Amino acid sequence: MCLVPSSEKDRDLIEQVQRRATRLVPETKGLPYNSRLKELQLPTLNYRRQRTDIIQTFKIIKRIDSVNQDCRCSQCQSKLMLKKPVVPQEGTDHSETLQTQRATGYRHHFFSTRVVKMWNSLSDDTVQARTVNEVKSHL
């Protein structure tokens, strides 16, 4: 089971591990953190999380990974991710647009809630990719 850091404090604690590790490289020791990341060609924790979320969403939508979409609890009355029924207008959304779900409490940090805005902001080329590697190359 993979736990996702839900608070900014938790994310900062995890990011500190990378901060310390980048200081171990002698060539980058005196540089600020963002410069060390750039020099070492490393992404931030936030970028890695967003990229992974987008790739996983692609796998779910394209049915590469199977997910029980009908699983419901008392808090979540709808399916995991629902596509918008309307046809997108040019320049706004793409054909795989997801519906925004109401999120309260802990549900605000659920995968299906946090990924919708990122997914809907992707280009049509990225969303219409046929393989996971194509999606990765578009990110």
Image (cartoon, helix red, strand yellow):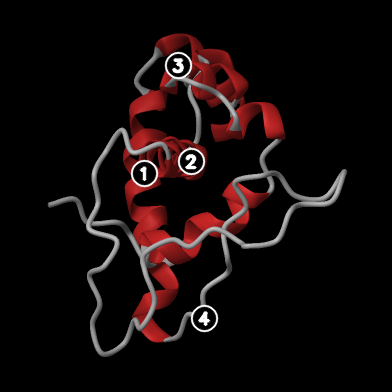
* 1 or 4: tag closer to the N-terminus: 1
Mark 1–mark 4 distance (CA, rounded to whole Å)? 20 Å
Amino acid type at image mark 2: Ile
Q: Could you say which is closer to the camera, residue 27 or residue 12?
A: 12
Relative depth, front residue between 85 and 51: 85
Q: Name, please, the residue furthest toward the bottom.
A: 74
Label 2, secondary structure: give it: helix
Residue at left 40%, top 85%?
105
User: Which image quadrant for residue 107?
Assistant: bottom left
Amino acid found under the numbered disc labelled 4 = Arg
Q: Residue at x 56, y 16 (%)?
A: 137
Tell me the kind of residue under disc 3: Asn
Q: Nearer the viewer, residue 51 or 98?
A: 98
Label 1 with label 3: CB-CB less than 8 Å: no
Query: Mark 3 packing: few (<14 Cα in 10 Å), some, or many (20+)?
Result: few
Query: Separation of disc 3 and disc 4 at Cα?
Result: 31 Å
Q: Is residue 55 above or below residue 110?
A: above
